[in-house]
Structure formats: structure tokens, C-alpha cells
Amino acid sequence: MRDIAIRETENTPANVTHRRPLWCQCVTCAAAQPRFAAPTPLVVPVRRLCGAATTRGGVAARGRRGHHKGRCGVGIRAATTVARQTRGVDAGTDDDAPTAPALVDRVRAWVDQAQRITVVTGAGISTDSGIPDFRGPNGVWTKNPQAEKTATLQHYLGDPEIRRLAWRNRVESPAFEAQPNVGHRAIASLQDRGRLLAVVTQNVDGLHQAGGTDPDKVIEVHGTIWWTRCWGCSDRRPMAEARDRVRAGEEDPPCRVCGGILKSDTISFGQSLVPEVIDAAMVAAERCDLMIAAGSTLSVFPAANAVPRAKASGARILIVNGEPTAMDRFADAVLLGSLSDLLPAILTL
């Protein structure tokens, strides 16, 4: 039986008066049921979540873990770890759930055994480099939904004020000063070991290349901030030129070739993806024997399709993230916590 993490919900009914009532929700089928807080911080008991029979009753006071198989067909276990930074879930047995250190050791063994590793990354890997993500609790778009308009093609092309705002943001963006962190370097270390097939990244910051990964192995499905492209004639130039023009007083610098609208060479909402890039990403998914998805909610498509594509091709799936993802049901193991802690722990010698 496969185990996944659960998340607490805020939908506790008013008539629930148990000590510290909490509700648990299966991240796969979304079924919710109340649970009790455990006497110890290491183990949390689980009540029946998905209406199915309990395969192992959990009594926290005896140090046991609740374990259920829900109607979604996925096992559910609620448990915090000793460090309370990593919550590991893995395809272990019903009776012997690995501790966080044991799960990390198991995952390290998978990395050592793999010959063709594809890594899928999202904004979460770059937050420790000082680049805020977009959809997380402190994300740019979470805090300011209007900011999303600068990344929406119809608004960008149709509203000069949106373009002026976008150019101000590009001049002030911390992404252009950011440095790769230990997570980027840990991924690059797979290349040094001859195990890295490809990095499929949803990020546009170029930090994988700066962190030592061969640019030929990096598939940037959403483009790059380091270049501009004219919407009219497709002229492509370094972003530094346009940023200098904005600093010199041009609020919305036009293309120097045709006078058309300039934008960063990234994929905006409403803009077609580059088919050859997506094809390359899916090929990397199909050819790997281990896929590691790191720092992504895996909710943006078609990039997120890399996970089920790899699974269908026989690869092991490891998800490393700060919170549960939309693809946890495909994972052989899920590690939740700081990527700067977890990635070096599982990837470096």
C-alpha cells in the first residue's frame, strides 16, 4: 500500500468539541474527517478518512501510526517526523513506515542506482536564492493578483501601462542579481556523476546553468528572462540592453528593428508554448529511470505531464517540495521540507 501525506483543513464544524479538534484531508480524494492531536509531537493518530476499513489502527500514546486505505485507493498516514521539517511518504509496507532519515537513505540509494535522472523544477527551488515564487503562501501573485496581468499576453500587448509596470519590475527584479543555491548545485552534481539526463525547468531565471548544469541539458519550458524578443519581428537580444534603456528613461522600449512591442523571451499566459521544447521535455520524461520533481506544485501543464509520462514509462518518481503537490499520487516517495536541506542530502556524495 502506498502512503501519502495529509493536510489539515480549516473546516472544523462548530459542534466538534474534542481536545484540539483538527480535520485531515486526503490530498488525493479530498475526503475530510476529524482527528485528534497526538500526545507526542512524533505521531498523529488518524480517524477513518475515506470511509474505508482501517488497515492498521493508530494509537498515538503507544507510538503507533494511523493507516487507512480510502475510497480513492490511496493509503493515508498522518505523522510528523523527528525534525518536523521532512514529512516522508513512500511505497513501504503497512506495518513498517520508514522514518524520515530512513526514507532519505532509501532515496539516496535510488539515486545511486539510477543511470538516467530527469529533474523537474519549479519556482520553489529558487526561493532560497531570493526569488519569490508566484503561487505559494508568500507568492508574488498570491499577495498581489493584479501583478499577474504583467504575465498575461493580452494585457501586456493591449495595455501600455501594464507594459510600463512590467519594465519597472524587470529593472527592480531580484532575479537578475540572484545566485544559484545549494539546491541548484546539488542537481548539477548529478551531471558530474554521469547520472543527469536532463533538467526540465518551469523557471526562467537561468540559475541551473549558473549553478553548473550544462545548458544543453536544461530544458526551459517557459523561456528565459535573460533575453528579449520582439512580438512583431522576433528580433532577440540580451535583456541587459533593454533594462539599460529603461534606466535611461524609456518606460516602454520598442524594438530597435521594427518598432514593435518588446517582451521578455518567456512564455506568458495566453501565449503558445514552443512545441519542440515541450517535445524535448516529454522525451526526457520517457527516457529517465528516476524522475525527481523539486520545488513545483506540479499544477501547471503541460510541464506537469512529465510526471505521469515518466511513471507510465517505468521510472521511479520522487517529489521534493515544501507542500503537497497535485502529482503526489504518482510518487514512489515524497519529501516535504526545505529544498536547500533535502536536495544536498539525497543527491550529493
Image (tube, rainbow, N blue to C red):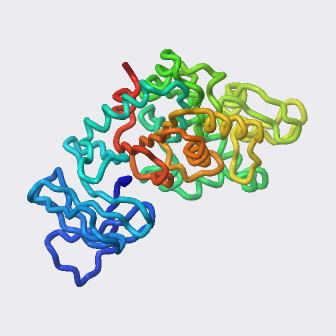
Q: Nearer the viewer, residue 337 or 50?
A: 50
Q: Nearer the viewer, residue 149 or 326?
A: 326
Look at the image and tell me in which quarter the N terminus lies. bottom left
Q: Say whether residue 227 is left or right of residue 87.
A: right
Residue 52 location in percent, x, y? 34, 72
The image shows a total of numbered marks equal to 0
77 above or below 118?
A: below
330 above or below 213?
A: below
Look at the image and tell me in which quarter the C terminus lies. top left
Residue 304 location in percent, x, y? 59, 48
Q: Say whether residue 215 is left or right of residue 93.
A: right
Residue 306 location in percent, x, y? 60, 43
In percent of the image, x 36 and y 45: which residue is there? 336
Residue farthest toward the top in the current orientation of the protein: 192
In percent of the image, x 34 and y 42: which residue is there? 337
322 above or below 9?
A: above
Residue farthest toward the bottom in the current orientation of the protein: 15
Q: Say whether residue 180 is left or right of residue 229.
A: left
In percent of the image, x 67 and y 26: which residue is there? 240
Q: Quadrant of residue 69?
A: bottom left
Residue 261 location in percent, x, y? 81, 42
In percent of the image, x 39 and y 22: which residue is there? 348
277 above or below 331?
A: above
